[in-house]
Amino acid sequence: MNNIIVKISMALFLGLLMIPKINAQEVLTLHDCKQKAMDHNQTVKSALSDLESSEASLTLSKRSMLPAFDISSSYTYLSDPNQMIVPGFELPTVDGLPSGVYSPASISDLAYENSYSASLGMSLPIYMGGKLRHANKLSSLSLSMAEDNVDLSKSDLLLDVETKYWNVVSLQEQKGVVEKSIALLTDVLKEVRNRYETGVVTKNEVLKTQVELNNSKLSLIEVSNNLELAKMSLNQSIGNGITSKINIQDSIINIPEQLAAISYSENHLDSRPEIKMLNNQVEMSKVEKKITNADYLPQIVSYANYVSQNPNRYAQQENEFTFNAGVTMSIPVFHWGEKKLKKVQNKIAIQKAELDLEESSELIILEIRQAIFRLKEALVKLDFTTTSLEQANENLKLETNRLMEGVTTTRDLLDAQLQWQQSRASYINAKTEVKTNEAKYYKSIGDLRL
């Protein structure tokens, strides 16, 4: 019996130890969310893979200027090699009389039964019209574009995560406001019921208060559901399970004071990854034009080979190793106007890249200015809601005191409570709008970071 009691006690003890682990929730900061999203997001991973591929392409482009070494070998077996049969004959004399000297018949092989070759060769480009140098420049520009694409993918992801993060913070604060309203209305309902029982107020006052309390409880359910959905959305972005339990460390949205001084600068445009990529695209189009020109210039390549082969017409005896070296040159002469047509294509590609750059620059300038206007508008709205909240706080405090003193009606207090709740909600929404517009502003100028 004692053993059974001991086992039950141990089981209960272990169960109690596990409860905190089961109920434990991950506490995250904004930086944590951004870092987890970076590690999880497939678009960023794909951009990083492209960057790694561009780095390998640049390395290959540089090594194409170095000597190349190759080993080659071959073997051929002929089961019945062709032969030339020379019949026997009597050798003639100068005067045409029989010499009496007979040349026997012979058989000569026209092909070897076993033929083979093995060689170690080296080739080195001497002059390719600048093609290798331009190809190296093209790979370098491609690498820069891959780096800018990584920055672009990260900035899009960071804006998405920050927007979702502040949405969760906002809903948490909204939930706190509704909970305070419920607590206040619960106290008011008790006071009104006491007054109703003493005959000071009518039953209608009790019902009005009960309705307001029920509305607040319904609002709490709606806010709680929206908060859970917002957390699910954030979980998806940062790589957590959709239903993972998380807590956000920030509970109050703080607004930096320096935001009011923001203004547009020409340097903002150059910081955008899109502009960097388009500038590189223009340069790549120009380099491709130079590569096209290089295709129609002389191409000079040197080579050297160390060879062992059978048969070997360069060797004095069988299985002898021979060495040969040389230079080859090719000069394009006539290709039916191919060079001219390719130049036209390159010119059009350059013009298109420049037009894309010009159009995108105008759109991004507009985006930056819109981000500045919206952020400043959000700051002004925050000032207005701050003043409204201060007035609502004072009004609620005043009406609460007056109700306790019996010099006001329940309706006046309920109106004051509703005004306070709405003002508080507007204030939280204004702060959230400032934070999201702040993130959009920093993204618009290419400065949204971890």
Image (spheres, grey):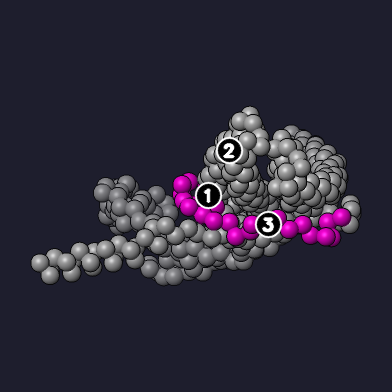
- Name the spot of residue 298 as percent of width and height, x first: 73, 53
Q: Nearer the viewer, mark 1 or mark 2?
A: 2
Q: Nearer the viewer, residue 274 or 300?
A: 274
Q: Earlier in the sequence, mark 3 or mark 2?
A: 2
| Disc 3 from disc 2: Cα separation | 41 Å
Q: Disc 2 marks which residue?
A: 197
User: Is residue 170 in view from this perspective?
Assistant: yes
Q: Image quadrant of residue 112?
A: bottom left
| Disc 1 from disc 3: Cα separation | 21 Å
| Span shown in magenta | 235-260
**Residue 60, placed above or below residue 236:** below
Secondary structure state at the residue bearing disc 3? loop
Q: Disc 1 marks which residue?
A: 235
Please, what is the three-letter code of the amino acid marked with disc 1?
Answer: Asn
Residue at the limit of the structure toward the left, as seen here: 1
Residue drawn at x 55%, y 47% as measured from the top left: 231
